[in-house]
Image (tube, rainbow, N blue to C red):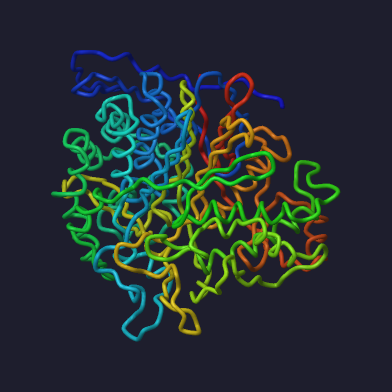
Amino acid sequence: MAYNKLRTFKTPILASFLLVTFVFSACKTQSQKTGIAYQIPEPPEISSGYTEKPGWETEEFAVASANPLSTDAGYQIIQAGGNAVDAAVAVQLVLTLVEPQSSGIGGGAFFLMWDGEEIHAFNGRETAPSGATPELFLDENGETLPFGDAVRSGKSVGVPGTLALMKKIHDEFGELAWEDVLAPAITLAEQGFNITPRLHAILADDESLRNDELAGKFYFDSDGNAHPEGYLLKNPALAQILRNVADEGISAFYEGDVAQDIAQRVQSHERPGSMTAEDLANYPALDLETEEMCNNWKTYEICGFPPPASGHLAIMQILGIMEHLENPEVSFQDSIPSPEWLHQYLEAAKLAFADRNQYVADERFVEAPDGNWQSMLNPEYLTTRAELIQSNATMEKAEPGVPGEMQSMYGIQKTQPEFGTSHISIVDRDGNAVAMTTTIESGFGSRIMSDGGTGLPGGFMLNNELTDFSLNPVDEDGNLIANRVEAGKRPRSSMAPTLVFDGESGEFLAAVGSPGGTSIIHYTAKSIVGMYDWNLNAQEAVDLPNFGNYNGPSVLEEDRFPAELIEALEAMGHQIVVRPMTSGLHAIQKTETGYFGGADPRREGVVMGE
């Protein structure tokens, strides 16, 4: 594999610990308790669309995230002596500010970490409020709300888990002081950042956000136009909230003014939700630690999350089913998958999504098939599923299988849109590796902004995560949907933060993941196959054209596949839809000399390290 040497921005390195207090200047700030100096890097000049990226070779550590400012925050934290967990917290909090359409403290996340000896998994997924019922998204006539109305409402807001997760992992594994890892986000919120082309384009395209009392004033001018590229955007409300969290801990978010403001904005919406301040106060008491799922594929071990995350199960079902098929003579040529390989993948995806739509939901509320989620990955079961795939013909639509001894009584959830999300991959100097996928679901979530009761401009966006539940609690035959709304339940997710290991030695090999709703499953699977079946480096694997199937028509990324390939798939019976598929993959791959990082050319992310 050919690697490009590390390219970093010309940004000052985070200073050593100091024992004195500094005041803010035009370009830097320091934690008032320990003196960590965070310096704002040069504004990024990365456009939206598709921007070729070189890949980054490092020797000691690497940080990959969706924005140069967030990546730089993680980079500076590691330079100051922090580890991958410290960096992940800093990256996430900066993303709240600079990528508000995708993640933030108003949402949730899945965190996966390798500490050199074992894997740690923490589930910071949002929960349904105590007042939520299975009929949450039904109108007074018992009809399902239009999806857009459900999203843009107080009904869709789940109790946020991101900050509780950040504090939990920092308490257990962090090296730097809590206030230090919050310093980059506080500094940028106070002093401002330049709106990027991607953020401007998404703001300009979102009509609903203008209607929110706070967001409309914050992101748009008096004429309702989105602030332009390069506009210096300061967020004093978020800065104040994070300062309080730095000083007082997460009780400053989950109790008091912030909790009251979140509840009030949810309850006062024209389509109100039931969330209360008590719902928020109860979240930090949840047990966030969970058991990871690890499964073999070829000579590798792939590790991810159990339900309510569906990503790992679906990826491993797809790859596992394909292992039981005869390998095509040619799988990969001219930098794209072959039609024969794609046919197998797309058919396997139909089978995986059929199972996902019937079985997968919060494991605290539903029983896994045969009492164990691993039953869905049993080799004998995958063999029976693979036998349904024909070499030159397609299934119009797959039916769920029976992974255990008994047929499920759950109904099949209809396909619903999923959006948003961001992914972070980090490996530090000690080899600690993090894969974290984080979200507020749709672009700008519920389109409800909270200023935390500060009365200052700005704040953070509240998620619309509850629309990841089935909007209707039953199917057309009246069978209960496993992923229906229930109080305290976590909605099903497609997020798939993934760690890859050598199946024999157990050596860490890669951290990878992506945003993209249900397409996360395909984006992440594509990258794993690219790196460990087609021998591509992380950047080459991320660059691969995107493709997928959700148990219906097959989708191919626009302008990335030749007409001959599309015609070959159509000749096999595939219904092909060509459209943009905006992944946001970030992968860090272990090499003989260190690490190699890839950032998705479809977004603004970069990799930094040494």
Query: Does 197 appear above or below 397?
Result: above
Q: Is residue 487 above or below residue 139?
A: above
Q: Residue at x 35, y 42 (%)?
A: 96
**Nearer to me, 359 or 253:** 359
Viewer-closest of 515 and 153: 515
Residue 389, image quadrant: bottom right
User: Position of 240 compared to 72: left or right?
Assistant: left
Q: How many marks?
A: 0
Q: Residue at x 29, y 59 (%)?
A: 212
Q: Residue furthest front?
A: 405
Res. 28 image quadrant: top left
Q: Residue at x 58, y 46 (%)?
A: 295
Image x and y of residue 445, in percent: 37, 56
Which residue is nearer to you in this view: 411 or 530?
411
Position of 441 compared to 501: left or right?
A: left
Quarter that holds the N terminus: top right
Tell which of 42 and 338 is nearer to you: 338
Confirm whether residue 374 shows in the render: yes
Residue at the right extreme of this rendering = 329
Let me know if residue 557 appears in the view.
no
Can you give x and y, in whole percent of width and height, for residue 415 in the image? Answer: 53, 69
Give the percent coordinates (x, y) of residue 15: 33, 15
Say whether residue 247 is left or right of residue 7: left
